[in-house]
């Protein structure tokens, strides 16, 4: 007869074995695990699993962001594991980011069994609904039990958690896992994986369809758009790599320019980019342009773009019809100007409008020519689109000319340089604060397949180093991170993962000794308190920190040195930090001078005077 301890150990082994086995069967490949005793059953079972990839991390906050970067880059759910207590609470920032950015994470928090909760047991906090409204699902798992129905339950929860994390809108789920001592699973029992389906099939196969657009809605929309020649497509952060092709075809048919956020996936690639504009953040700062070019309609996809001038432009012309498409059924609409919210898969909607356009055109020529409304194809190469294309070209050329004449290091120019330096297949992660904004303005799109990434769910300056290391760990291509010094300092713990897991990442550290973004804000007008409260200079020398983590560190003082250092970083691999020293006040001056150059160039080429032809 088994002793009570071995019974517990047997139940623990087969239950946790079935749980981890089911996570893998449901599609999880990567597990980010942090040390601790209470999580031992999970950690050992994952470590012993023949195919699970274990990423060990010492700091839970960094670990969770690493998992987030990995999940975002691979577009698949990643599992996080931690012990009980504040360890779990340290997952919070990344869970919030994952929730807001719709990234699938399965968060496993080990816990004490029920009788040891709320009684002063060590390292025990209330982990029930720990992440509140920032997870899609919470389960306080039953204690390990080897009974057949309990194993079916365990597998069902595991499969359901993975499915739910990836189901639209994707996001994090938390499973709280109570374990009773002894915590060591028996390896032989754990791998028997009882109650499994044959041939590695999941216990439950979960299927979910896309939101299909309604036929009546498509017909009405196609008719409305065809009657509105002055339209724009705006594409914010979104993650469907196949949207580019159909969206650019729709833009061509409608004659609408596409204002493409850096995280839209539209700026780079071999799709037709004739109507894809990437310099609007610069030319929409020009008051005369904004005033002159009122519009009829906007069709907006993805989350809200980062560009503030674009937001102000929409607010200026708020009588225009703003149609927002959210295939996830969420509400990514902070302008509060939307007249229509469409819950339909973006790609399917574009295809359906295009088909409707073809049918309208066929009907127009064949049967009732007199009655047909303007077929949407007629807007193609409209004066409206040509004007926007010219503005984009003029703005980009004005910026390039300004850079030609400027020798000194400038934060914005880093992105123009990277556009030329990064090889096909590279990943460029931008930190929050000025890097994402400068990426928006100064990174010209191109044929190269360069994937642009950032944490824009909650815009935190925390966890950015780890997120980029997670992206690098995906192994899809050379990875470069551009980050401000405060943000770098914030997650310097994350650097350890590069050393421990032999990751390749080139970090471009824009060191302006503090929070550069605040110098653009009205707060900068309070000289008495500005530096203490907002500028926050720290005077840190990051070189010894880099040495501690085995990174190569270069401080560059000019563009040739910058180019060589970045190229070296990408080619040599490992962790490479390229520090670009800049000065906060000068950074603001240079940005403002560039906006003026753009406005002057627009005026010089009479872009505001262009005749508006209604077609
Ligand atoms: C976790 C977190 N804390 C505080 C902020 C507020 N914040 C936004 S930008 C910023 C300064 C960032 O400085 P740095 O990373 O050096 O970039 P720079 O502004 O110089 O581009 C701060 C503190 C935030 N977004 N996230």
Image (cartoon, rainbow, N blue to C red):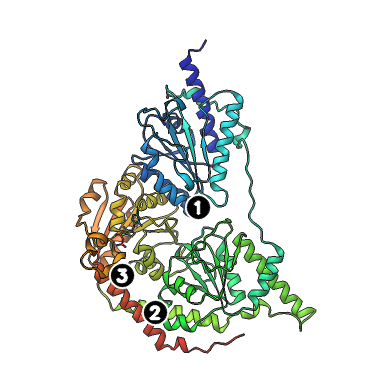
Picture quadrant where residue 501 is located: top left
Q: Is residue 525 left or right of residue 380?
A: left
Q: Where is residue 342 shown, x and y percent of the image?
A: 61, 63
Query: Which of pointers 2 and 3 lies earlier in the amino acid sequence?
Result: 2
For residue 397, the mark is: 2
Q: Residues within 10 Å of mark 1 (few under 14, many from 20)?
A: many
| Ligand 1 found in image quarter | bottom left
- Identify whether 425 is placed above or below 589: above
Q: CA distance from mark 1 to mark 2?
A: 36 Å
Single out the mark in the foreground, 1 or 3. Answer: 3
Residue drawn at x 75%, y 80% is: 365
Residue drawn at x 52%, y 29% is: 142
Residue indicated by mark 1: 102
Q: Where is residue 163 shown, x and y percent of the image?
A: 57, 44
Query: Which of pointers 1 and 3 lies earlier in the amino acid sequence?
Result: 1
Q: Residues within 10 Å of mark 2 (few under 14, many from 20)?
A: some
Single out the mark in the foreground, 1 or 2. Answer: 1
For residue 522, the mark is: 3
């Amino acid at each position: 007869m088994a002793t009570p301890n071995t019974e517990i150990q047997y139940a623990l082994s087969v239950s946790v074995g079935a749980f981890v086995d089911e996570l893998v069967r449901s599609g999880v490949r990567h597990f980010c695990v942090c040390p601790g005793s209470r999580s031992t059953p999970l950690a050992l079972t994952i470590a012993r699993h023949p195919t699970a990839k274990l990423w060990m991390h010492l700091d839970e906050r960094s670990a969770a962001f690493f998992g987030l970067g990995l999940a975002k880059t691979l577009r698949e759910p990643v599992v996080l594991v931690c012990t009980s207590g504040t360890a779990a609470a340290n997952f919070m920032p990344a869970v919030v980011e994952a929730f807001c950015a719709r990234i699938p994470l399965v968060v496993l928090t080990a816990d004490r069994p029920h009788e040891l909760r709320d009684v002063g047991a060590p390292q025990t906090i209330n982990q029930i609904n720990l992440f509140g409204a920032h997870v899609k699902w919470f389960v306080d798992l039953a204690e390990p039990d080897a009974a057949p129905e309990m194993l079916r339950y365990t597998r069902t929860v595991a499969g359901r958690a993975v499915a739910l994390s990836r189901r639209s809108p994707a996001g994090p789920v938390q499973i709280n896992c109570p374990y009773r001592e002894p915590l060591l699973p028996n390896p032989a029992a754990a791998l028997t994986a009882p109650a499994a389906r044959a041939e590695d099939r999941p216990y439950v196969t979960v299927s979910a369809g896309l939101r299909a657009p309604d036929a009546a809605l498509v017909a009405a929309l196609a008719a409305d758009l065809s009657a509105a020649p002055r339209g724009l497509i705006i594409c914010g952060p979104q993650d469907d790599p196949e949207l580019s092709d159909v969206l650019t075809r729709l833009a061509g048919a409608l004659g609408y320019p596409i204002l493409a956020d850096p995280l839209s996936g539209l700026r780079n690639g071999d799709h037709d980019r004739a109507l894809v504009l990437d310099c609007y953040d610069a030319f929409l700062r020009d008051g005369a342009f904004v005033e002159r070019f009122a519009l009829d309609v906007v069709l907006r996809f993805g989350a809200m773009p980062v560009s503030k001038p674009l937001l102000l432009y929409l607010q200026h012309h708020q009588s225009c019809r703003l149609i927002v498409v959210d295939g996830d059924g969420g509400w990514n609409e902070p302008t509060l100007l939307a007249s229509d919210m469409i819950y339909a898969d973006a790609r399917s909607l574009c295809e359906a409008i295009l088909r409707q356009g073809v049918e309208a055109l066929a009907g127009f020529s064949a049967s009732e020519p007199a009655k047909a409304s303007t077929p949407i194809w007629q807007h193609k190469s409209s004066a409206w689109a040509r004007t926007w294309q010219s503005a984009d070209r003029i703005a980009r050329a004005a910026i390039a000319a300004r850079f030609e004449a400027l020798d000194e290091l400038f934060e914005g120019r880093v992105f123009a340089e990277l556009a030329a330096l990064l090889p096909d297949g590279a990943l460029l992660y931008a930190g929050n604060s000025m890097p994402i904004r400068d990426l928006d303005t100064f990174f010209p799109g191109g044929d190269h397949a360069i994937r642009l990434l950032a944490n824009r769910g909650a815009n935190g300056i925390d966890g950015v180093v780890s997120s980029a290391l997670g992206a690098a760990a995906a192994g899809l291509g050379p990875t470069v991170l551009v980050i401000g010094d405060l943000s770098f300092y914030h997650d310097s713990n994350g650097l350890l993962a590069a050393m421990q897991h032999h990751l390749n990442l080139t970090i471009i550290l824009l060191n302006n000794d503090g929070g550069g973004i605040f110098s653009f804000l009205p707060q900068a007008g309070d000289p008495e308190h500005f530096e203490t409260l907002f500028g926050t200079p720290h005077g840190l020398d990051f070189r010894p920190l880099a040495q501690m983590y085995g990174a190569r560190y270069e401080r560059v003082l000019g563009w040739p040195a910058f180019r060589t250092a970045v190229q070296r970083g990408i080619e040599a691999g490992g962790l490479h930090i390229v520090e670009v020293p800049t000065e906060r006040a000068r950074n603001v001056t240079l940005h403002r001078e560039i906006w003026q150059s753009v406005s002057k160039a627009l005026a010089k080429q009479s872009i505001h005077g262009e005749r508006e032809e209604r077609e």
